């Protein structure tokens, strides 16, 4: 029997409950999983039900149980269910061998009287049997003559069932007398609370199951098998339908948990405007868009929750795979092409700061299907769509939202409380233009024609890219990396995002899923430095203004957080969105980042190094006055960073990798503290500023300590932290920063040790020590870039070129890199696109091209 034989309302309910964070699936046994037979010891379950229940129990966040009136021992023997499925016997009084404590003297004596009485009653009729259990006894009359059976039941009801201390439960052709409380409903609640279930599904057929149905509430589902009055909300006729319902629930939940059809991360393509980012799937589906800011809640979160989390798709009426997806050269416009259909997508630039506009231009000869399913607040807000002549209005959002689509006829459907609009379009008579407008209720035509709006958006990127000095090694890929970095710049505030997404996993199915849509002081400084090295200074200047503004919110520079919102505010507490299954079933989905509260003492170095890089670039551009090369504001920032180092450099910290364990004296953090002071002294000497007394001494003290405590004779390498032997790719900066000369044999030894322990084929891992989190992660693209630079510093050009070639090969079809790479599965991992990865790629190309 298939799912189509189930009632439609039940199928819809099961689809909904399959999407709760933690699910309990429970069932009665006799009459639900197993048929009634003349010999109760031959009541074996339907194999299809067993398979489905066992598979459900094996899914993440899913419990499975059988709650039966049978004794637990008999239930285990008959059902043959694996240990993953919780068995509860005796109508809820037997959970396991130790759940029913030893009966007291009075209860034992009462049970003996009950058993004796039931056996006496049974002896008066043929085919009447007594079943004894640890705390109860049951009289079965299913095989008796109906009249004789009824007389026996009546005799028990009038006799032993009335005794003090006896709990009575009646079912089909059975009456059970217990000397302790028995209640399937209570058992269901115990299971619910033990597993923290968000919802429960219970299948039952008997009057005893009504106690469980009575306990169901909210999103719970009760399914009654057979006829008769019931508190259950749904009904099936046969045991085969129970098996079909369990199998249907299994597939729906497995699909939801696995993030069915999740596109490979490296194949996702980012669009950007000066204040927004969005991601497309290879099939031109809008899979990720947040509003009003990139670190706000998602309006389309298909990437983390499938279709139900919000998507906006366009494709040919006759389904087929796209022939290509690519950027229009030197822009952030993405073109997806099928045989007779083309979709050009971009984020509009000519809109106010509180608007996010996404435009789709559809051309070609083939008919297309458009599906519009906005799901604000990560799918938590309920959406209603209203079609008008000029498009669709979206209701249920915090901000107004419309889709301008004049002349298109929409069909709006509702499922699970959300509405979706679909339309069939024919672009053969001319381009079809769809304009999603977030932040306005205006459905009217734009004052500026679409072609001019697109030209404005594209010239923003094209004109900027034309002024860059790009390395000549893989120039097209380098230009795309530069554009990606600028796409992560939030122009309105001056901040720079670490990545465009949250919760893309470092391990498929794992829990290392973090929110990177914020501005890290370190990451942003490195990104700005990379752009300065290409000849674009404005991003660095705006970012340093942003840092100045953030400094005004803290009592001292040493109290800077590692990261802030894009507008320089402290982050709210890290939270989990349980309703989303995560990318490819990788849960939890996180919003916010607890690293905000960590101590990361390396953040000061990249800021001072950025100021030094910017000063050199200003000099190279023709600026001659020291006061303009190194402004008073920049020098004040340098002094503040050195002051922060002076106060805190000797403390342990959480380090660049934001380890969520005990702080350590990380070598990389100490190196960055040294770099802060070293670059400050260099700036003072070069541009006529006065270095404070004690800076030189501080620099020397930090250096001596790093060289003394950071080196391990056992590991023959500088290590991750003082006193340890574990390695960390970030420690390569002991040579990359200039703290020791690259010719120092200890640096060459560190490169060799890093290669041996942390490199795996095409990638380099950050570290391999236990960081207190379950699961693993991929290799880090930035670490591979560091190793390329380290190879060059010690004169190993061929290994550097080979690793760079592998790094280039990891880029997706449109040239984007995520955070990490799995060398075994050969797929990208982590948030995407990642600033670290692209700035590392650019650095390698610059060094190799020299």
Image (cartoon, grey):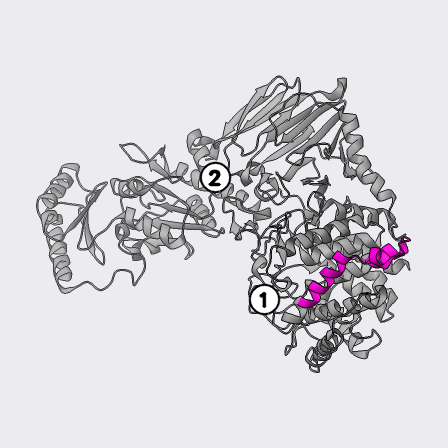
Q: Which residue is mark 1?
A: 771
Residue at image coords 66%, 43%: 263
Residue 698 sits inside the magenta stretch: no
Magenta stretch: helix, strand or loop mostly: helix
User: Which residue sits at x=83%, y=55%?
Assistant: 628
Q: Position of residue 436 (x, y in %)?
A: 65, 29
Pick the quarter of the image with the C terminus.
bottom right
Give the residue displayed 15% in from the left and 57% down from the top.
111
State how far apart marks 1 and 2 are (Cα).
39 Å
Question: Please, what secondary structure does the residue beneath circle 2 have?
Answer: helix
Residue 382, placed above or below residue 83: above
Q: Nearer the viewer, mark 1 or mark 2?
A: 1
Observer-nearest of 135 and 232: 232
Q: Is residue 506 visible?
A: no
Q: Position of residue 326 (x, y in %)?
A: 78, 39
Mark 1 neighbour class, 10 Å CA radius: few under 14, some 14 to 19, many 20 or more:
some
| Dot 1 or dot 2, earlier in sequence | 2
Is residue 640 depicted above or below 734 in this figure? above
Q: Is residue 616 magenta?
A: yes
* Element carrying mark 1: loop
Q: Give the numbered dot on residue 542.
A: none
| Residue placed under numbered mark 2 in the picture | 248
Range covered by the magenta-colored residues:
615-643
- The quadrant in which the N terminus is found is top left
């Amino acid at each position: 029997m298939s799912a189509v034989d189930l009632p439609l309302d039940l199928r819809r309910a099961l689809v909904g409950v399959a999407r709760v964070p933690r699910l309990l699936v429970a069932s009665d046994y006799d009459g639900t999983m197993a048929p009634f037979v003349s010999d109760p010891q031959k009541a074996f379950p339907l194999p299809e039900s067993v398979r489905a229940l066992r598979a459900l129990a094996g899914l993440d966040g899913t419990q499975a149980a059988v709650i039966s009136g049978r004794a637990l021992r008999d239930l285990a023997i008959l059902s043959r269910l694996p240990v993953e499925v919780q068995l509860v016997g005796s109508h809820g009084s037997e959970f396991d061998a130790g759940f029913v404590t030893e009966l007291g003297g009075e209860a034992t004596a009462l049970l003996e009287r009950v058993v004796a009485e039931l056996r006496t009653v049974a002896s008066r009729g043929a085919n009447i049997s007594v079943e004894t259990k640890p705390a109860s006894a049951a009289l079965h009359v299913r095989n008796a003559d109906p009249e004789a059976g009824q007389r026996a039941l009546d005799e028990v009801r009038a006799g032993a069932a009335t005794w003090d201390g006896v709990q009575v439960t009646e079912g089909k052709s059975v009456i059970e007398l217990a000397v302790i409380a028995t209640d399937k409903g209570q058992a269901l609640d115990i299971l619910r609370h033990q597993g923290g279930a968000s919802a429960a599904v219970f299948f039952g057929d008997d009057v005893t199951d009504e106690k469980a149905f009575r306990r169901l509430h909210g999103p719970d589902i009760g399914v009654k098998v057979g006829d008769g009055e019931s508190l259950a909300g749904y009904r099936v006729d046969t045991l085969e339908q129970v098996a079909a319902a369990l199998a249907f629930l299994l597939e729906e939940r497995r699909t939801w948990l696995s993030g069915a059809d999740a596109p490979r991360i490296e194949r996702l393509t980012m669009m950007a405007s000066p204040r927004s980012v969005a991601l497309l799937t290879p099939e031109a589906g809008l899979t990720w868009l947040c509003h009003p800011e990139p670190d706000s809640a998602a309006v389309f979160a298909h990437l983390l929750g499938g279709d139900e989390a919000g998507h906006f798709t366009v494709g040919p009426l006759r389904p087929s795979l796209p022939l290509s997806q690519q950027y229009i050269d030197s822009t952030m416009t993405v073109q997806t092409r099928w045989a007779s259909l083309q979709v050009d997508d971009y984020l509009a630039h000519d809109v106010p700061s509180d608007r996010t506009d996404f435009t789709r231009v559809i051309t070609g000869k083939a008919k297309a299907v458009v599906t519009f399913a906005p799901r604000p607040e990560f799918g938590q807000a309920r959406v209603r769509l209203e079609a008008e002549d000029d498009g669709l209005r979206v209701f249920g959002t915090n901000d107004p939202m419309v889709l301008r689509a004049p002349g298109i006829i929409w069909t709006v459907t509702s499922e699970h409380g959300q509405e979706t609009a679909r339309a069939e379009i024919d672009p053969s008579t001319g381009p079809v233009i769809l304009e999603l407008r977030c932040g306005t209720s205006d459905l009217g035509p734009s004052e500026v024609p679409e072609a001019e709006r697109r030209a404005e958006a594209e010239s923003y990127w094209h004109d900027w890219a034309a002024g860059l000095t790009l390395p000549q090694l893989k120039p097209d890929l380098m230009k795309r990396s530069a554009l990606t970095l600028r796409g992560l710049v939030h122009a309105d505030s001056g901040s720079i995002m670490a990545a465009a997404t949250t919760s893309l996993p470092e391990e498929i199915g794992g829990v290392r899923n973090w929110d990177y849509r914020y501005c890290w002081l370190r990451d942003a400084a490195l990104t700005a430095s990379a752009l300065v090295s290409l000849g674009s200074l404005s991003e660095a200047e705006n970012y340093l203004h942003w840092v100045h503004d953030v400094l005004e919110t803290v009592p001292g520079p040493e109290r800077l957080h590692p990261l802030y919102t894009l507008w320089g505010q402290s982050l709210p507490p890290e939270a989990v969105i349980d309703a989303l299954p995560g990318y490819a079933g990788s849960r939890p989905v996180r919003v916010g980042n607890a690293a905000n509260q960590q101590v990361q003492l390396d953040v000061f170095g990249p800021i001072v190094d950025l100021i030094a890089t910017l000063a050199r670039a200003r000099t190279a551009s023709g600026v001659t006055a020291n006061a303009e090369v190194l402004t008073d504001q920049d020098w004040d920032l340098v002094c503040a960073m050195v002051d922060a180092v002076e106060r805190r450099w000797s403390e342990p910290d959480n380090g660049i990798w934001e380890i969520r364990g005990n702080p350590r004296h990380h070598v990389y953090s100490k190196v960055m503290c040294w770099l802060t002071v070293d670059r400050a002294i260099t700036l003072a000497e070069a541009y006529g500023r006065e270095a404070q007394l004690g800076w030189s001494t501080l620099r020397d003290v930090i250096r001596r300590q790093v060289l003394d405590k950071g080196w391990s004779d056992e590991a023959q390498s500088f290590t991750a932290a003082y006193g340890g032997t574990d390695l960390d790719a970030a420690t390569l900066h002991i040579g990359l920063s200039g703290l020791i000369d690259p010719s120092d044999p200890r640096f060459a030894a560190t490169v060799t040790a890093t290669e041996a322990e942390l490199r795996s084929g095409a990638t380099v891992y950050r570290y391999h020590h236990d960081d207190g989190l379950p699961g693993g992660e991929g290799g880090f693209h930035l670490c591979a870039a560091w190793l390329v630079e380290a190879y060059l510093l010690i004169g190993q050009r061929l290994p550097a070129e080979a690793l760079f070639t592998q790094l280039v090969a990891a880029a997706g079809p449109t040239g984007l890199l995520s955070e990490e790479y799995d060398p075994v599965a050969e797929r990208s991992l982590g948030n995407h696109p990642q600033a670290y990865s692209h700035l590392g790629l650019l650095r390698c190309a610059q060094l190799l091209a020299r």
